[in-house]
Each structure stands twice: as C-alpha cells, then as structure tokens.
Image: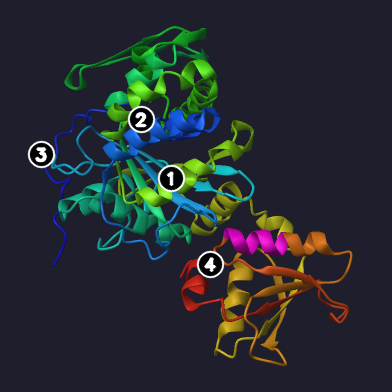
Amino acid sequence: MPLIDPLAGEPKRRRRKAGRVLLVLVALLAAGGVAAAGWLGSTLYTFFHSVQQVPTESASQQPPGLIVDRPLNILILGVDAGAGAGEPAAPQRSDTIMLARVDPHTGRVGLLSIPRDTRVPIPGRPHPEKIAHAHAYGQAEGGPGAGARRVAETLEDFLGIPIDHFVEVDFDAFRAVVDAVGGVEVCIDKPMRYTARSQNLRIDLEPGCQVLDGEKALQYVRYRQDGDIFRIQRQQRFLRALAEKVLSMRGVLKLPQLASTLGRQVTTDMPTSRMLGLAALLPKFDTAKLEMGILPGEPGYVDGISYWLVDAEDARREALKILAGVDVEGNEAVRVEVLNGNGRRGAAGSMAEVLRQLGFRVVTVGNADRFDVAATTVLVRPGDEDVGRRLRDALAGAGAPVRLETVDDLPEDVDARVLVGRDFTDSLAARGAGG
C-alpha cells in the first residue's frame, strides 16, 4: 500500500521549532558521571521512569543486563513539540538529526550532524527526498516511534552504519535546562535578527561574548538565516559549551529537579537496562573525547528544489571517521590477506568487501587450511602490532570485532592476515558492508 504523503498541502509557513539542538539528553546523562552513586541512582531512576519507551526493533538488542560491552550507534532527533510517542495533529518533520556513537572501551563519543535538507533515498518513496521528510512519512503510518524508525532505516541504507537505538527529544524543556545551569557563555560573531509572527518567533541577539539565558539560547540555536550548515555549527559549539557547564558541580546539582520534566520530553526504543548500562559508563566520558562533524556536501537544486547534495561514498567515509574514528585514507597503505576459516561459502569475500569499504587493500582472498576457527582473528608479524590495532579498531567500528595475534609465516606481499571465524555472521557482514 502506498504511503500517504503527509507533507502535501502543508502550510508554507515554517513549523514551530523548539530548540533545534540535541542537547538535553546528552547533557543530562553526561552530567551523572561526577555525582555520588546514591544521588545519581535516584536522579537516573526519576529520569528513566519518566521517559516514553517504545518497543525496540533493533536486531542488535542485547539480553537484559547492565553491561554495555560494545560500541553503540544511537540516532538522536530533535522534533517539533508533541512529535514523540503521542498523537500530534499532523505528521512532523525532524528538524535536527544526529548520529552518536558511544564506545564503552575508549570513552570516545562521536557526533555526526545530518543537514535536514540532505537528499537521500527514503524507503518506500519513489524518488530521493530531503531526509527531514522521512520522520513525517513514518509517523503517518502510525505507531509510537514510527517516524524515528523511518529516519533510522534511511540512514542505515545511505551510510551503511547500523543504528542500535533512537532517542527523540522534544525541546520545550530547552529553556529550563539552560536556566537551571545558570546560562551558557557563547561568542556571537554578528547581529542575529529575525521575526516570524506565524511562529511566535523573535530573534534579537547582539554580537560579542555573553552568557545566554534559556530564551536567548533558544534564539541562538534557532537562527538559520545564514543557512543550515552555519546553524549546525552553532548547535555543536553550544552543545560542547552546555556539556562542559553541566559537568560542573553547580550544573549537576540542578539536575534532580529537572529529571522528571526532561524525561517526559524524551521518547526512545532503548530498554531501561541498556540506559542504565550506559549510565554506569559515564565516568569514562569527557568532552575532550567528543568529536563532531557534519555530513559533507554542497547546496544545490534538483528539479527546482533546494537540497544539501551528498556523495554516498564520501558520506560513508565521513561517517566512519567521525563516529568510529576510522581513517579510511590512511588504511589504503595496509595490504591484507583474507582467509575463510569457518567453511561458510562466501565468508572471506564478505569480509574482503568490509575491508575494502574501510579503505584497506585486499590482495588475496582464499580458504584457510582449516574450517573450525571460532573467533575472527587479525594476524600480523611481531613488531607490527600497530598495523593489527588499526585493522582491529576499524573492523570493530564497522560492527565486526576481532582478536589480534602475531605470527611469523605471513607472505612477503601482505602486512596482515584476517582469518574469518564462525563469529563473523552474515548479519555482521551485511552491516559492516552497508548491505
């Protein structure tokens, strides 16, 4: 059955925007890492109890428990008020889109912003459209979380990055968060003035370094008269400044009174056990390990409609770089031999394709001398452990974790051998290769 077009006949006026940044949940969770265990537990319990949870459809769902033992990719959406698990009067487009990757082993967090006008194929639609429309199409089909899931499906197909969960944030609480931490200091480089009576919006900011209260901060992150890319850059700068402010004890002490309010503004398919598992890791994270980027592209027109035009290959490389810290260009110097050690037909070929997309030069694909290898392993010469770590980390970033060992019998024309084990499943191969 064809999808209903929820955007047909939509008024031309801009929809109400409430914040436009993906700050509230990230800041709230990051702050807990410096609090006492009892106080933190109480605050997190209040927050998680208030969150609107919907059933997960993630194939990567872990069994219940408090351990997060692998990196997680999380889609974070900023939407108009009421666009979460409730029933808004009309389907709404996602205004702010970010992919976050949290690595429990290194404490690294990567944030990739996706411009709302990015032209992408949307599942179920006949032609590529703006990714901001995906949320509305999914939401029109009904069901809590349907809009966020459609955005996640779109990005998985376009970027080849598996998405484990989504977090959808209603930013009506944005002003309260900023005010609760005593405001946030930013440096404004030019006058920002804009009025839209239809949105009940008036922006009036003077240049200079200053502490913005909640209302002024909302104006700062909503301003887009100079284009969406500059707006995203402002959002990212504000996110870092707010995170640093919340991490201070003065900011942390304000969080209990906000936990319940903020929870009601969040919708997610992340089970409570996984949220608690992430919360337990918070002491490992700090803003120095927060890497941010924007999906590369350029403005342009297709059939008279303005888009952010992105090359799919460039997009995947940037996603791997920002989210997983994978240096695709640097990997081109590493020559790899891939051997099938599990006996499944095509296993070595699938691994080879994953490695090629990560930038490695695959020089040999074949069978190992045995098919009972349990764990996929990277083999390098003694002294070449840095090459092995490069391979190991890149594969882990693509969703295919491996072991690292040293051997003395590698051919002269290869730098490393990847021995494919039984743990390299078809789903891992598809996810790593973006298939």
Q: Please tell me which residue is depicted at 49% across the width and 12% down the height of the picture.
A: 190
User: Which color scheme is applied?
Assistant: rainbow
Q: Amino acid at mark 3?
A: Ala
Q: Closer to the N terminus: mark 3 or mark 1?
A: 3
Q: Decide if residue 432 is on the left or right side of residue 220.
A: right
Q: Closer to the N terminus: mark 3 or mark 4?
A: 3
Q: State the separation of the CA atoms marked 4 and 2.
A: 31 Å
Q: Amino acid at mark 4?
A: Gly
Q: State the separation of the CA atoms marked 2 and 1.
A: 26 Å
Magenta stretch: give its range. Answer: 390-397
Q: Closer to the N terminus: mark 1 or mark 4?
A: 1
> To which quarter of the image does residue 306 belong?
top left
> To which quarter of the image does residue 299 belong?
top left
Q: Which residue is mark 2?
A: 20
Q: Amino acid at mark 1?
A: Leu
Residue 287 drawn above or below residue 120:
above
Does residue 138 appear in this view?
Answer: yes
> Do the residues under discs 4 and 2 have CB atoms within 8 angstroms?
no
Q: Secondary structure at mark 3?
A: loop
Q: Which residue is mark 4?
A: 432
Residue 89, which numbered label? 3
Residue 300 position within the rendered picture, expressed as x and y whole percent measured from the top left: 41, 43
Q: Please tell me which residue is depicted at 79% across the width and 63% down the height of the picture.
A: 387
